[in-house]
Image: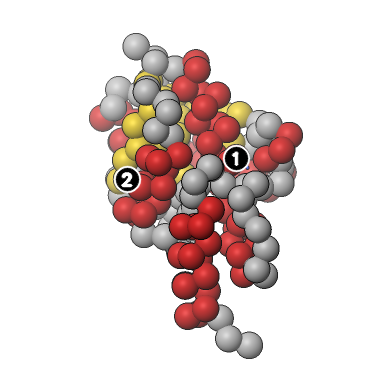
Amino acid sequence: MKIAVYPGSFDPVSNGHLDIIERVSKVFDKVYVLVSLNPYKTYIFSGEERVELLKFATKHLDNVEVEASNQLVLNYAKQKQAKVIIRGLRNFIDYQNEITLFQFNHSIDQDIDTFVLFPSTNNLFLSSSSIKELVMFDSEIKDYVPAGLADRIKERISAVLNKNSKL
Ligand code: ADP
């Protein structure tokens, strides 16, 4: 059985993430989408909320499971018997981060590899941060987040940003 883990912050899930998940789910028998902790980021959505949004976005994909974990991605992958970690690569900034992450992971465990996917054209410039920025400046996000989630994502980001941002 071919098993992959797609780890990330998903704060919140975007169409770019969903596109990667859909494409990977066609190639692997089982895909675990892992909401994990990035020590360099602060989050708007709680871990539970991010899991819930991802579950809603991937409900049409039978072989995809969403979970959250604070453990090292490699340990989570091993626990799931996954041999592959999936990451997305949009630009040189991602390249720098991803190659460092890969070298780090590979130096610890050579049995688990990393497969990198390029975004589909529509999602090339899309990030969770750009979704937050759009909400901040009162712009529409429907085209950038999975169907049925725009209002919920907007509400949550607005609530947090209104609380925290004053000129
Ligand atoms: P992390 O904090 O782990 O970088 P993200 O949620 O920002 O978490 O991203 C998870 C993974 O998805 C990363 O590999 C990132 O490069 C990739 N990714 C993010 N947005 C897109 C997108 N629009 N298209 C393709 N891959 C993406």
Residue that label 1 marks: 16
x and y percent of residue 154 in the render?
A: 53, 61
Looking at the image, residue 17 lies above or below residue 44: above
Residue at x 30%, y 36% (from the top left corner): 75
Check the picture and name the quadrant holding the N terminus: top left
Residue that label 2 marks: 68
Tell me the amino acid under the disc marked 2: Ala
Q: Which mark is residue 41?
A: none
Q: How many marks?
A: 2
Judge by depth and name the residue closer to the eye, 94 or 108.
Answer: 94
x and y percent of residue 18 in the render?
A: 53, 36
As helix, strand or loop, the secondary structure at mark 1 comes to helix
Local crowd size for mark 1, using a 10 Å CA cut-off: few (<14), some (14–19), many (≥20): many
Is 42 left or right of 130, judged from the image as shown? left
- The earlier-in-sequence mark between 1 and 2 is 1
Check the picture and name the quadrant holding the C terminus: bottom right
Residue at x 50%, y 17% (from the top left corner): 26
The answer to whether the beta carbon of the residue marked 2 is less than 8 Å from any atom of ligand 1 is no
Looking at the image, residue 64 lies above or below residue 132: above
Residue at x 71%, y 38% (from the top left corner): 122
Judge by depth and name the residue closer to the eye, 165 or 90.
Answer: 165
Looking at the image, residue 27 lies above or below residue 156: above
Residue 133 visible in this rendered orientation of the protein: no
Instruction: Give the residue at the far top of this rendering.
Output: 1
Q: Quadrant of ligand 1?
A: top right
Instruction: Give the residue at the far bottom of this rendering.
Output: 167
Local crowd size for mark 2, using a 10 Å CA cut-off: few (<14), some (14–19), many (≥20): some
The answer to whether the beta carbon of the residue marked 1 is less than 8 Å from any atom of ligand 1 is yes
Single out the mark in the foreground, 1 or 2. 1
Quarter-wise, where is residue 132 in the image?
A: bottom right
Residue at x 61%, y 50% (from the top left corner): 142
Judge by depth and name the residue closer to the eye, 2 or 112.
Answer: 2
